[in-house]
Amino acid sequence: MSSASLSLGERIGRWFGNPPKEGMDALPVRVHGREFARTGAAPGSIKGFDQALIWAIAGLLMWGLVMVYSASIALHDKAQPGHAWQAQYLLRHSLSICIGFVAALLVFQVPMDRWEKAAPWVFIVSIVLLIAVLLPFIGKSANGARRWISVGVMNFQPSELAKLGTLLYAANYMVRKMDVKEKFFAAVTPMAVAIGILGSLLLAEPDMGAFLVIAVIAMGILFLGGVNARMFILITCILVVAFGLMIALSPWRRERIFAYLDPFGADYALGKGFQLSHSLIAIGRGEIFGVGLGGSVEKLHWLPEAHTDFLFAVLGEEFGLVGVVIVIGVFMWLTRRIMFIGRQAIAMDRVFAGLVAQGVGVWIGFQAFINMGVNLGALPTKGLTLPLMSFGGSAILLNLVALAIVLRVDYENRLLMHGGRV
């Protein structure tokens, strides 16, 4: 049979590797939000997943592993406890990836309907941990911030779980509140209170960067969930004013803004603008093709946090414009693909699953945008890592868990499109 004579449903079946069988019950499926196809594959026979997405994630993880080693290789020179071994950050980062991989495999086994039931509880657990991290005998402090809880193999950062908890709760909330999303106070007030509680706890650490990401995740899901446009604009204006006041009322945050505007100025080059100025020097040294892997000079105690927040600057110095463009391109494709999986789920009336996937896309895409913007001098300095690449155990763990949920959404989409059951 020629491919031209096949129905749309039969072609979809061939794409996913399951040829149509005679006499099978067909299932109507909405394709791209417009057309309907009828699939004829045997129910429950599909075992597919998005292999291109898997390869993109694996590529970023492996490149990040190499860059973490390159950026941290000189830290053992410091006469400080914890910097005694040259490869310690490489091994710790490898361990985090292994733990995240095991967690992702386990999470992939959980159906989305169970995540929908568990969403409020994940959100509550994240709030409890954010409270716990503020307690002196539980939370760990570093550089004036109390953000970590020691769990033996890694220092866990509750704000990373709060990102996942927020997107699950927001997606669940939008599904439950579909009938009142045109009424401002009925639709927005409970969500605003929940995000306000999270924000207060995060600002007490302080961690304004994580609060910004969480606010954007919540706003993104509200928008994608169909909240009235006027309501969305009003909420956006309120958040912009709120973050503006946080900056205006905090002297050290104001200093960061001034340092961003003039990082090489005499008042800031050795203070608040030190990281940004050396990040720009690193990117400038890379030129088109970079100085070569391991050849970065800025990582040699000039650029603070080179293996975490400013890993992208070291990458730019060693791989040049070519490396920067490749990383930006992969993150753009990754975000676009995740958003497509979410739209596909919503098109099949799986609203919660679709909103969760799109929430992960907003999370990964926005945080990568902020980190790259900071490293390139386009945005004020913010303490956010580059997803999947920067050193950070809890960040890698939660990134992989979130992406495993996206792959679960994609798996269930394919299963339904082939006439199976979730």
Image: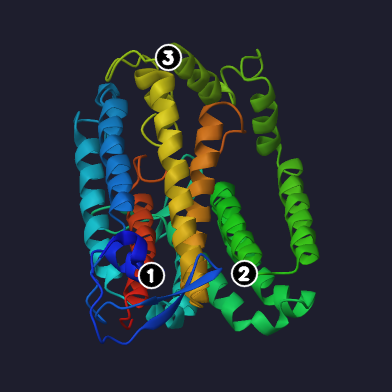
Specify the amino acid type for callout 1: Ser
The front one of 377 and 113 is 113
Residue 65, image x, y percentages: 26, 37
Q: Return the disc, 2 or 3, that comes first in the chain's sequence.
A: 2
- Residue 365 lies, with reference to residue 402, above or below; the image says above
Residue 170, image x, y percentages: 57, 70
Q: Residue at x 37, y 74 (%)?
A: 417
Q: Return the disc, 2 or 1, that comes first in the chain's sequence.
A: 1
Q: Which residue is mark 1?
A: 7
Residue 288 image label: 3
Q: Residues within 10 Å of mark 2 (few under 14, many from 20)?
A: many
Report helix, strand or loop for mark 2: loop
Residue 169, image x, y percentages: 53, 73
Residue 405, image x, y percentages: 37, 66
Can you see residue 299? no
Locate the C terminus by quadrant.
bottom left
Q: Which residue is mark 2?
A: 225
User: Contact (CB < 8 A) between labels 1 and 3?
Assistant: no
Residue 335 left/right relative to 239 = left
Specify the amino acid type for callout 2: Gly
Residue 240 left/right relative to 200 = right
